[in-house]
Amino acid sequence: MNASLLYKITVVALLLSISSAKAQTDLSSTQHVEVSFTGRLAGKPFACGSQYESVGSKKSTVTPQDLRFFVSDIDLLDANGATVPVSLDQDGIWQYKSVALVDLEDGTGGCRNGNAAMHPAVTGVVPAGHYVGLRFSVGVPYELDHGDPLTAPSPLNMTAMFWNWQFGYKFIRAEVTALPVPHAAGNGENAEPPAATGTGSASQVVDKSQRRSSGFAVHIGSTGCGNGSATVDPDHECKRPNRALVTLSQFDPAKDVVVFDLDRLLAESDVTENSPDTPPGCMSGENDSDCLPIMRALGLPYRDSPAVEQVVFYAEPKQ
């Protein structure tokens, strides 16, 4: 073997060794992270097909219909409070750029407008380190919020989460069907029920009239988005972005889970009634009084009420 060829072989081997060492160093400088989410209702795990009691201001009995929401711009917090962005895995289904769709319904029971597939955990990569907290936005960033869902990449092509008349996405889609709490007719808790007419007993008449189910939906998205069309960007940033910012100062991705607590979201809402001449529940409309307690729970300003600290999301140890 001549000296020139031996030199070339030696150089190539050295370069391969350096490249391998660099790859190992790069790999060790990052770590995979998984942020898990779960739903809670009436102090119990959220599950389609289940029934929950004592929900909302009137302590109603409800069954779930939906629980999906977008999260974006996810950061971990280190011990010094510095934010470190999570680079999301681009899985082609649930996560795109900085946005992920968290889906906690499975299409069963009352959630028949949903789908069987679920996505309870957001995954990505961060620089290797020790992290003690979490921060994220509930919503879709403005630059991704107003495209055409028919041509958008997944999960932005999931039309159940698109809000044509608001020219953007439903950041949160949470729905329940409620039954009013039975109560006696007349004045006072011990009043006699009304007399029955025709066939059937008085108790049957009262039960039938008092157990009409009603839907209560919470659809949160940006409003006041200027001129545009169902699939064309508005001409300026929306007046009311309605993107809730969640900061959990104590959160370990390996040990903790983020809870979406529907009890807290609906605590001040009568889920059996609806403000006259408004959509059922809260659709983020500016003149819907049903939205005031919902927005307050999410930490969002509404009308003359300023933003406060959100109470819907919190961390707890994984079970």
Image: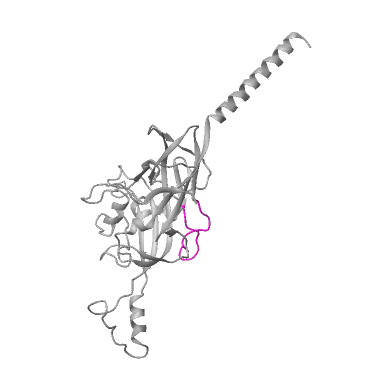
Instruction: Identify the image's colour scheme: rainbow, by chain, secondary structure or one colour.
Output: one colour
- Is 115 covered by the magenta stretch? yes
x and y percentages locating residue 269 in the rendered image: 30, 61
Q: In the figure, 150 relative to 51: above or below?
A: above
Most common SS among magenta residues: loop
Query: Which of the pair 17/55 is nearer the observer?
Result: 55
Q: How many marks?
A: 0
| Left or right position of 14 against 100 | right
State which quadrant residue 202 falls in.
bottom left
State which quadrant residue 286 falls in.
bottom left
Q: Which residues are magenta?
A: 103-119
Who's the residue at 22% across and 51% down the image?
Answer: 303
x and y percentages locating residue 91 in the rendered image: 53, 44
x and y percentages locating residue 227 in the rendered image: 30, 47
| Left or right position of 125 against 177 | right
Who's the residue at 26% across and 48% down the image?
Answer: 301
Q: Is residue 73 visible?
A: yes
Farthest-out residue, top: 3
Farthest-out residue, bottom: 198
Rendered-image quadrant of the N terminus: top right
Query: Which of the pair 128/234 is nearer the observer?
Result: 128
| Left or right position of 293 against 262 | left
x and y percentages locating residue 294 in the rendered image: 31, 55
- Is 164 covered by the magenta stretch? no
